[in-house]
Amino acid sequence: MKKTTIVIIVIASLSGICISILTEILQIQQWLKIIMVNIGCGLIATAIISVILDLFWSKERAKIEQDEMKPFLDEFKEFTNKLSNLEEQLKAFKILGLNSCYSSRNEALDKFYNYASEAIERVPKSKVDDSDCVKCTGKINIVSSSARGLIGYLDREDNEIQKKWRELITKHPRNFQILLTHPAYAHLRQPAEERSSGDIEMEILKTAMYLLMVAGMSNNEQRFYRGSPTVFLIQVNKHYLLNIYPYGKMAMNTLCLEFESANENSYVSDFSRMHFHHTWNFLQQNSKVVDNKPLVEGISDFSHILTAFSECTTLNCNNLRLTKDQVNELDTFFLEIKKIADTKKLKEWNLDSERNPFMKFVIQKKYVCCNEAVSENDIK
């Protein structure tokens, strides 16, 4: 019972009693006495009715109000819970530095091309550190399987964004550090991606040839990693693009996440450090080996590409997983990029008059192509 209600009841009760007593004490006319008695009885009756209403009607009214308000209160409670969850999510996004997500890599490449272009423009060419340094000024770090999704097929028509990336890398090779899957390990993903045998090996070898012969990259800019890829990565200063390689589909057609963090101790910075920087430095660590071969190898000479090509074999080390046609395709590609390659480098590698380095290598090493013998007649 509210205080105001109690005060009203007490006043009404006392007023009624007092008026009734005064009518008996005072000597007044009969008609006035009747009026005062009625007033007193009315006040007492009002007090009694107030008590009854407060005890019974107030409870009923409160119940009705509660029933009517319950849906609104429930909705409000749900709303506050959602706000609380949203606050936690925003907090997590802030910690992670998650900026955006994309349904495919091509959607993200356009935005990251702008990041890369701006980063290169801000650093004069003379200021780019040309040493083997993973954190030096003006470097854009990339982890990829074959880089085909980044720079295109090279020997056929590509979409606009892949052409733009290829031109940017070709124009500014010293600004990039690219870690590719070693072609000898690329076949592990081919069945899951429903690719033909040798497809990914061919892509990697073509990419390596282009980056070496046309872009002029050395082992400070491109390296092979002996292992199956896990996450495609582009790091442009504080911007990170992560594209996880799924078991049963090409990564470039799946989820990509964009992060931004200038904090070297953030989650995404720590991942990038372990995924790229730490691995990139394996080149200088003799203890990092797999199958008695270096886990990471630099590419600074055409012979390094031929050596990688020679490892694309079955358990029978002289049996290449590539067909004769695929080997000839590599030679055809070699002839095409010779037209735009650095002529000084070609002379240095004794390739200025070479036409069929891959098929000649197969014959010289007495390899077979998919269990099929090779002879001089197979040179095209």
Image (cartoon, rainbow, N blue to C red):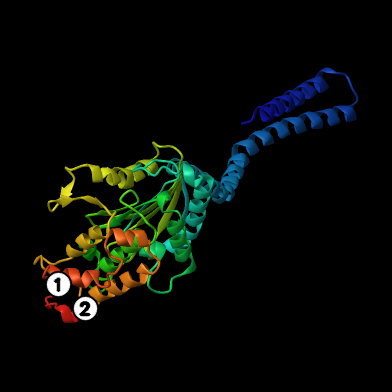
- Write the residue at 40% across / 39% down: 266
Label annotation for residue 379: 2
In this view, the residue farthest toward the bottom is 377
In this image, 254 relative to 38: left or right? left
- Mark 2 Cα-neighbour bin, 10 Å: few <14, some 14–19, many ≥20: some
For the C terminus, give its image quadrant: bottom left
| x, y percent for residue 247 | 27, 62
| Residue at the image position 43 percent from the left and 49 percent from the top | 175
> In the rendered structure, which amino acid carries the disc numbered 1?
Ile
> Percent from the top left, x then y, of residue 176?
40, 51
Which residue type carries mark 2?
A: Ile
In the displayed structure image, the side of residue 313 where residue 217 appears, left or right: right
Task: Pinpoint residue 31: horizontal percent, then vertical percent.
Answer: 89, 30
Q: Secondary structure at mark 1?
A: helix
Tag of residue 337: none
Give the side of residue 271 with respect to residue 192, left or right: right
Callout 1: few (<14), some (14-19), or many (20+) C-alpha neighbours within 10 Å?
Answer: some
Q: Residue shown at 16%/42% (left/top)?
A: 287
Per the image, the residue denoted by label 1 is 363
Q: In the image as oriented, which residue stretches furthest toward the left?
A: 316
